[in-house]
Image (cartoon, rainbow, N blue to C red):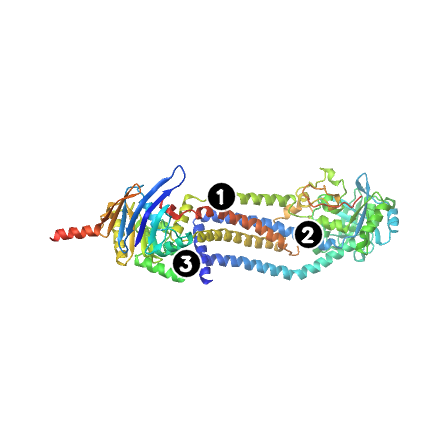
Amino acid sequence: MRRVTVAMLMLGFGLAALGLESMHARFSEARHDAARAETARLVRDLGLTDLALFTEARYVRHISQADLFTPFQDAPVSFEHFPSGTLVAPPAHLGRHAGALSARPIERNSP
Amino acid sequence: MIRLEHVTRIHNEGRPNAVVAVNDVSLEIPKERVTVLRGPSGSGKTTLLTLIGCLARPTQGRIWLDDELISALPERFMTEVRRRTFGFIFQRFNLIRGLSALENVMLPAYPTGESHAALKARAAALLERFGLKARMHEKSELLSGGEAQRVAIARALINDPAWIIADEPTASLDTALVDQFIEEMRALKKAGKSIIITSHDPRIWQADVVDRIVTMQDGHILSVEDVSARERAEEKEQNA
Amino acid sequence: MRRWLSRQAHLIDFTLGALLRRKGRNLMMLAVYTLIIFMLASVTFLGSALRFEAKAALNYAPEVTVQNLIMGRHALSPPDWVKKLSRIRGARNIHGRLWGYFYDQAVGANYTLMVPPPRARDLAVNLGEVIIGHAIADLRKVRQGGYLFLLSPSGKLFKLKVIRILPEDSALLSADLVLISETDYRAFFNLTPEDGYTDIALTVRNSNEIPTVVNKITRILPTARVITREDILRTYENVFSWREGIVLAMLATALVAFAIFAFDKASGLSAEERREIGILKAVGWETSDVIAMKLWEGGLISAFAFIFGAAAAYAHVFLFDASLLAPVLKGWAVLYPDFSLTPVVDRLQLITLAFITIIPFTIATLVPVWKAAITDPDIVMR
């Protein structure tokens, strides 16, 4: 077989895999819709405010609820509990200087 | 016929290391004959060959192919002329490593967009003609010297050019292979090809297939010798 | 068209043949390239899926949460705040929430203890009962109907009957929850009703009124800090954004890897390759053919790496639940939600990824060749 044929078959195979995956995405939507509806109900009923992704420290467990000085536990305005702390930015409402990497200007609406 | 008019080629023009490789050469190369450019290294014969073969442009002067002024063509057309008109056999053959003998022969025809099947058939037929049918799928670096030589000749012929240009084709070849090369050239000449060879190998210029020897030195032409005429004269003398 | 295709096919044939000459080296490079794209795409997919889930779920978070701050620290809200807040027109469902943290020494995990609000009728717990998140059930190996023993901070042992385990599907938000009755909660943490609540949540029916309500709250309760749902959502918009540490570090690594590739390519045009280009031009290839051939080289390698890297990343994140990234997500936590994510792919991010990988690589392949390709073909004769 020609090399170009082999290469194109391989690329075609890869594209087919991507195609199958996009179909997977479409078809698993229904299942996930149900799960999301359930989660949404739980969030509304319990008044949950945060993801339970990181449970090792309170300012990453409840990022949005962290008070202005929580970060001072270790270093000013930084969530330093590696690696979780590197995956989240300080809560948006802590102000524009919270987290040097968060370039997006943020309005303060806390007193 | 190829005609050169006052052709000069300067390498690295305008720089301190500028070299006049070919200096005011005027020459006519006849069709369907074997012409040898002879001279020591640095005499400008290879540069002259690149100018004739449209691989480079003269700094000054004109080159005509039949009635076409080829030295002034834009790059694209020059490539076109080169592909259509000339088949090249390089020193040490310059086959591409990693590709099979067959692919090496097909290479010059790739840009024409000829279908793979047709091109492959033509290349295979050529290789068969040169007795390489069994070796056609061998990687070029695994071919013997003689096989590589024949693949190089087959590659030069794939686009069916009118002119064959060979640059020091017999350097580093043993006598048997030189003889073989001369026989191939004879067959090509018989088939109506025009052939230009640069060589400082006496085994080439003494070959009876050669029609004309152009001797060069320091970028100039020293002499143009019509060997076939000489031979005919010698023959006459012997007969008399 | 057919001639064009046939010509391109020939060029591809040639470029692949040339690549296969250094099979080991080039396959290695392709593998590294694919791996880099796989890692970046995995993080991208995981990030956008998490952001999507967060947004979908937290859209139902309380519109307004009111926290008491004392000396800059989150403190209990006094019980009379509920009464004060109920005077605000537009504020509804005002209720004092009780939630806090508990470190379970038995397994070394942190739980979030919480009292379900009265309106959560499905999740009502009586004295001595508990509803737990899925991860806790796994960790403590308890089933519905079994008992969960917790040693309170003051040393009292609580024996709680597990009446329900929160569904695994909601684990991303509920994995570490322990829902107990208010009486149990206050007993557990030694809180009297006069101590008040952790914070106060309220809903605002008309979302246009939220700023007005927030204004009123800050006027009535000057020491309070108000967090709106908008704030929460905005906080989670940044989770796993490319600016954050690990992602940034990976991006930087990838870019350095590309720089090395590019440098290797740029300086790697050996005398042999140069000569080869000379041969091709001498036998009748145009400059454009040589360039096209090299474009195919860069393009094919990039396309291959990108397609396979992205396909593998999708499988990794959405079929295998991002198992390779789990250690990063877990961090030092013992308790970790076992979640599966809705496959959502951020197209813009994917396109960005394609651009920052494919284009530099192709250009890196091309630049040195361009220089070689425009030189006169008589190089072969020298």
* Along the line of sight, the residue nearer the viewer: B95 or B209: B209
- Mark 2 or mark 3: which is in front? 3
Residue type of the residue flagged with mark 3 = Thr
Residue drawn at x 49%, y 43% is C264
Chain letter of the residue carrying label 1: C
- Determine which quarter of the picture holds residue A38: bottom right
Q: Under tag 1, what secondary structure? A: helix
| Position of B39 relative to B150 (above/below) | above
Percent of width and height locating residue C367 = 49, 46
Point out the residue furthest to the left here: B240
**Number of dots carrying numbers:** 3
Percent of width and height locating residue B202 = 24, 45
Name which of mark 2 and mark 1 comes first in the sequence. Answer: 2
Query: Mark 3 and mark 1 in contact (Cβ < 8 Å)?
Result: no
Residue C91 shown left or right of residue C362 in the figure: right
- Mark 2 or mark 1: which is in front? 1
- Within 10 Å of the Cα at label 2, are there few (<14), some (14-19), or many (20+) other Cα atoms? many
Query: Mark 3 and mark 2 in contact (Cβ < 8 Å)?
Result: no
Residue type of the residue flagged with mark 2 = Arg
Mark seen at residue B112:
3
Mark seen at residue C51:
2
Q: CA distance from mark 2 to mark 1?
A: 38 Å
User: Can residue C338 be seen?
Assistant: no
- Mark 1 or mark 3: which is in front? 3
Mark seen at residue C264:
1
Q: CA distance from mark 1 to mark 3?
A: 32 Å
- Quadrant of the image for the N terminus of chain B? bottom left
